[in-house]
Image (cartoon, grey):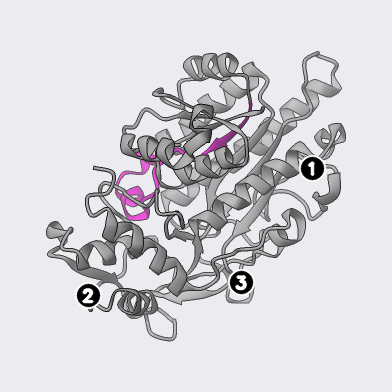
Amino acid sequence: MSVIALTGGAGYIGSHAALRLLRGGRRVLIIDDCRRGQPGAVAALRLAAGRHAGALEHTPIDCGDADAVERALRTHGVEAVMHFAGLINVGESVQRPGEYYRVNTGATGGLLEACRRAGVERFVFSSTAAVYGEPEPDQIPIPEEARLLPVNPYGWSKLHVERMLAEHADAARAQGAGGQGGKGGQFRAAMLRYFNVAGADLSGHLGEDHRPETHLIPIVLRCLLGLEPERQNTVSVFGDDYPTPDGTAVRDYVHVEDLVEAHVLALEAMEGAGAGGGAGTGGEVGGGVGGDGGVGGGAPWEGVRAFNVGLGEGFSVRQVIEAVRRATGMDPRVRIGPRRAGDPARLIASPARAMRELGWRPKVTSLDQIVASAWRWMSAHRQGYG
């Protein structure tokens, strides 16, 4: 049974991915020192996994510690890594850019070095739609080939990792072609550019519990439950003067279970690509990473591939608040404030590549369903994981 390592596996998306992998018969190693992840999420994960819980291991180390991670990868016989760990707050990245480059970019360099030493050649990276910055009007929905020009340090910190992955693939291929031994030349990576991830495990075991919370849907729900006293239990809307239909920023939302399914499909595509998949280029950052060649059906995987993950539909902040009203029957208090630095007006995905090449199809396809799943978990877990 293959072992998949998940950095940040005690976090929101990582824990959901771990559950999906366990239920699919994989062994999972969570690499998370829980400085930002939730130890309670690991306990909830073990409970949710049921008979699969014995296939879960957790090692509390820093994913950027190359020596410690190498030992863990070798000890557990890890065959692939899903990299979820990192900082995610756009506004904070503007205030503390150095921290974002250190944690998101620098630590990934250590992780990749550990993978190189341990011979791990399958890598799924948690990237972001923020790599696109403010897209051109004629490129919405946004394809992977769109201009890559982030408008905040968070987006740049992730884009630098995409570049590192492409160069890592190029170096591995060159070493393999040079006859330097090992399995060089077969490194493959999938870079999943998330749009706005939301919702909770539909079986009710796992949910979203950030400390502090930074995402819109859980913030609105927490305000309704009286759990945001530092915000006066009031939702702040950052800007109502954007060039959008109602003046508030528009985002594409995707349910967390559909997002993790895209990770699993990307991993399976890399595993099924065959030994020839190491051929080809690592791709170029600047006009989209990776080419347009298909990878389905065992076709060669061209080093690194980028995939958008979103529904392809945009919802404004006001529309999200209305969806919360419908799900809860309650009316949140709202305060309109100025725009936040680094926030684009509209980010909407074109998920066509993931659908075409990975066979990805979202199952939770409406904003109301996404919000309802988040509300079910949060109303039953008011203190999160405790």
Classify residue 119 by image quadrant.
Answer: top right
Classify residue 78 by image quadrant.
Answer: top right
Position in image of residue 243 (x %, y %): 43, 81
At label 2, counting other C-alpha atoms closer than 10 Å, the crowd grade (few under 14, some 14-19, many 20 or more) is: many
Q: CA distance from mark 2 to mark 1?
A: 47 Å
Position in image of residue 117 (x %, y %): 63, 16
Q: Nearer the viewer, mark 2 or mark 3?
A: 2
Position in image of residue 56 (x %, y %): 50, 29
The residue that label 1 is drawn on is 301
The residue that label 2 is drawn on is 332
Q: Is residue 86 magenta?
A: yes
| Marked residue nearer the N-terminal end (2 or 1) | 1
Residue 182 located left or right of residue 347: right
What's the amino acid at mark 2?
A: Pro
Identify the secondary structure beneath mark 3.
loop
Image point (46%, 70%), residue name: 369
Q: Is residue 101 visible?
A: no
Query: On residue 141, which mark appears?
Result: 3
What's the amino acid at mark 1?
A: Trp
At label 3, counting other C-alpha atoms closer than 10 Å, the crowd grade (few under 14, some 14-19, many 20 or more) is: many
What's the amino acid at mark 3?
A: Pro
In the rendered image, the quadrant that contains the C terminus is top left
Q: CA distance from mark 3 to mark 1?
A: 25 Å
